[in-house]
Image (cartoon, grey):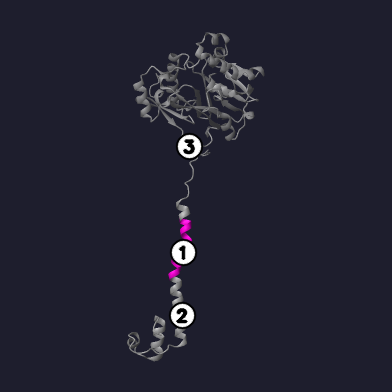
């Protein structure tokens, strides 16, 4: 056997004692190796072939899988947001912020300032102004243990498709419109009151709706609507339509915040007039904790905390609105109040801090509902 595998060669040499050099150089014929050595040689050859074929087989098997993986499409971006509610405790009060949506506000609506100052203040807070300043619309649901109170109701369909999410987010938060027994309106502008109705029917069928008398007397007045500029008359129509089904069922009531009247026990209305004639904020207290749901004290967080003298065109009385804002910001900072704002970045809950150049907004930190603090 001239082709000699290692095992066969060793067997041959071991079995015959023949000089291995003589067999390898071919000068002398090699004796036939024993059968056991021939068998060992065949096994060795088979193993060699198997080992040489295995990598090729693995390549043929794995390559199609790897090729498919390499060319698979990446997962699509979802581009959806989480449900628009945020919950926290204020003492024993459960407070749920509800997101209605947003509206882009033109910076030209800001008054008693300059375009340069506005852009500087916006840039300082990394707030974009194109196609307008994105401005949230928020409402607040407070479970007092005795009442389920909704403060403001959002815009529904009154101001376009980017608003109208209150009902969806209220349900996502674990409640239903039928469970709300009290609605407190900070004022009767459409982005706070239009959510009361849908197709002319009451959205909160078991609720009594409250508004300050001065605000109701203004926004529900036919004579005030007639005297208003043509471009502003639609706001009066929105207000009347929003409360109509509640008036019809005797579930719309007014109170006099300036005289200290309260719509329900445990909630103190705070007169914050200027933005509208009867604009009212609501102070909730539980133990040592206090929450002021202030409505439209601030429309532009990037500018009006730093410069409280900046007003907005929507104010019925801008000068009074500025004076009110300065007073409320100072009271909130001194009292270390929790604050909820209808147009602060969602959830719009946090504190006001006094600083050297005005005031600063300190938003709430996201976290679980804890019972140990």
Left or right of 345 in this view: 168: right
Disc 2 is placed on an element classified as: helix
Q: Mark 2 and 1 residues: CB-CB less than 8 Å, in contact?
A: no
Badge 1 is on which residue? 58
Q: Is residue 124 magenta?
A: no
Q: Is residue 355 visible in this depiction of the protein?
A: no
Q: Nearer the viewer, residue 70 or 189?
A: 70
Q: Is residue 63 magenta?
A: yes
**Quarter where residue 332 is shown:** top left
Residue 66 locus on image (x, y percent): 46, 56
Badge 3 is on which residue? 366
Left or right of 180 in this view: 356: left
237, above or below 1, in the image: above
Q: Residues within 10 Å of mark 3 (few under 14, many from 20)?
A: few
Q: Residue at x 54, y 12 (%)?
A: 218
Disc 3 is placed on an element classified as: loop
Residue 176 locus on image (x, y percent): 62, 31
Badge 2 is on which residue? 42
How far separated are the C-alphas under marks 3 and 1? 52 Å
Pointer 2 or 3: first along the chain:
2
Q: Residues within 10 Å of mark 1 (few under 14, many from 20)?
A: few
Q: Residue at x 41, y 83 (%)?
A: 8
Disc 1 is placed on an element classified as: helix
Q: Which residues are magenta?
A: 52-66
Residue 53 locus on image (x, y percent): 45, 69
How far separated are the C-alphas under marks 2 and 3? 74 Å
Q: Residues within 10 Å of mark 2 (few under 14, many from 20)?
A: some
Q: Residue at x 58, y 10 (%)?
A: 222
How far separated are the C-alphas under marks 2 and 1? 24 Å
Q: Nearer the viewer, mark 3 or mark 1?
A: 1
Q: Nearer the viewer, residue 171 or 229?
A: 229
């Amino acid at each position: 056997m001239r082709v000699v595998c290692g095992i066969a060669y060793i067997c041959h040499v071991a079995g015959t004692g023949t000089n291995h050099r003589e067999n390898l150089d071919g000068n002398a014929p090699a004796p036939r190796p024993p059968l056991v050595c021939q068998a060992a040689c065949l096994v060795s050859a088979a193993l060699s072939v198997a080992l040489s074929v295995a990598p090729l087989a693995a390549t043929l098997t794995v390559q199609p899988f790897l090729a498919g993986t390499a060319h698979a499409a990446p997962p699509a971006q979802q581009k959806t947001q989480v449900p628009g509610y945020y919950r926290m405790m204020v003492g024993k009060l459960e407070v749920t912020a509800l997101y209605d949506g947003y509206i882009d506000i033109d910076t030209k609506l800001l008054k008693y300032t300059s375009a340069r100052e506005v852009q500087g203040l916006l840039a300082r807070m990394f707030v974009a102004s194109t196609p307008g300043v994105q401005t949230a619309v928020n409402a607040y649901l407070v479970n007092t243990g005795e009442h389920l109170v909704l403060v403001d109701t959002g815009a529904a369909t009154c101001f376009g498709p980017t608003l109208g999410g209150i009902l969806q987010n209220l349900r996502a938060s674990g409640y239903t419109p039928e469970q709300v027994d009290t609605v407190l309106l900070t004022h009767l502008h459409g982005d706070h009151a239009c959510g009361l109705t849908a197709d002319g029917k009451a959205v909160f069928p078991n609720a009594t709706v409250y508004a300050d008398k001065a605000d109701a007397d203004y926004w529900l007045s036919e004579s005030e609507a007639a005297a208003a500029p043509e471009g502003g008359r639609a706001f009066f129509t929105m207000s009347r339509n929003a409360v109509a089904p509640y008036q019809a069922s005797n579930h719309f009531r007014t109170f006099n915040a300036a005289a200290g009247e309260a719509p329900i026990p445990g909630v103190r209305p705070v007169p914050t007039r200027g933005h509208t004639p009867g604009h009212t904020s609501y102070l909730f207290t539980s133990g040592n904790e206090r929450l002021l749901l202030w409505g439209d004290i601030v429309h532009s967080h990037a500018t009006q905390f730093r410069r409280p003298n900046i007003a907005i065109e929507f104010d019925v009385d801008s000068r009074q609105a500025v004076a009110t804002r300065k007073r409320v910001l100072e009271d909130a900072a001194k009292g270390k109040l929790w604050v909820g704002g209808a147009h602060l970045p969602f959830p719009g809950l946090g504190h006001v801090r006094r600083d050297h150049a005005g005031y600063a907004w300190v938003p709430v930190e996201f976290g679980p509902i804890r019972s140990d603090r």
